[in-house]
Amino acid sequence: MSNTSNSVLYIGVTSDLEKRVWNHKNGSDKKSFTYRYNCNKLVYYEVFGDIRYAIEREKQLKNWKRDWKNELVNKNNPDWKDINLGDCGSSPQ
């Protein structure tokens, strides 16, 4: 997740991406990093079949330099557009 100016990046792991994105976009947790830094734009994600591998990848990415993270997003989403996972404007089930 990033903010409008792409100056902040948030990396996380979830078993329900659409619900998590909805929560970030709607500011469900006022104490969260994404709320404080207005990270409400999904710019990149990866899918894993096993949560252990997802957590391992999350830790790896969090240890990367910012330039490497930018390069990863640029390679897959050069305009840093908000990735539409469906209608994240309505409440998750």
Image: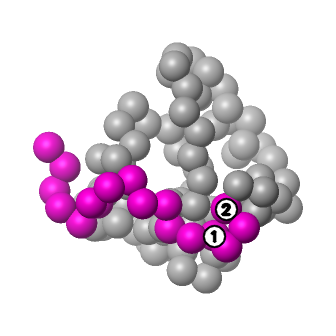
Count residues near mark 1 (Cα–Cα under 10 Å), then give few for <14, some for 14-19, many for 20+. some
Name the residue that disc number 1 marks: 80
Q: Main secondary structure of the magenta part?
A: loop
**SS state under label 2:** loop
For the residues marked 2 and 1, what is the alpha-carbon distance in whole angstroms?
5 Å
**What's the amino acid at mark 1?**
Trp
Residue 29 position within the rendered picture, expressed as x and y whole percent measured from the top left? 30, 59
Q: Are marks 2 and 1 in contact (CB under 8 Å)?
A: yes
**SS state under label 1:** loop
Count residues near mark 2 (Cα–Cα under 10 Å), then give few for <14, some for 14-19, many for 20+. some
Residue 54 position within the rendered picture, expressed as x and y whole percent measured from the top left? 58, 28
Name the residue that disc number 2 marks: 77
Bounds of the magenta segment: 77-93
Observer able to see residue 65: no
81 drawn magenta: yes
31 or 24, nearer to the observer: 24
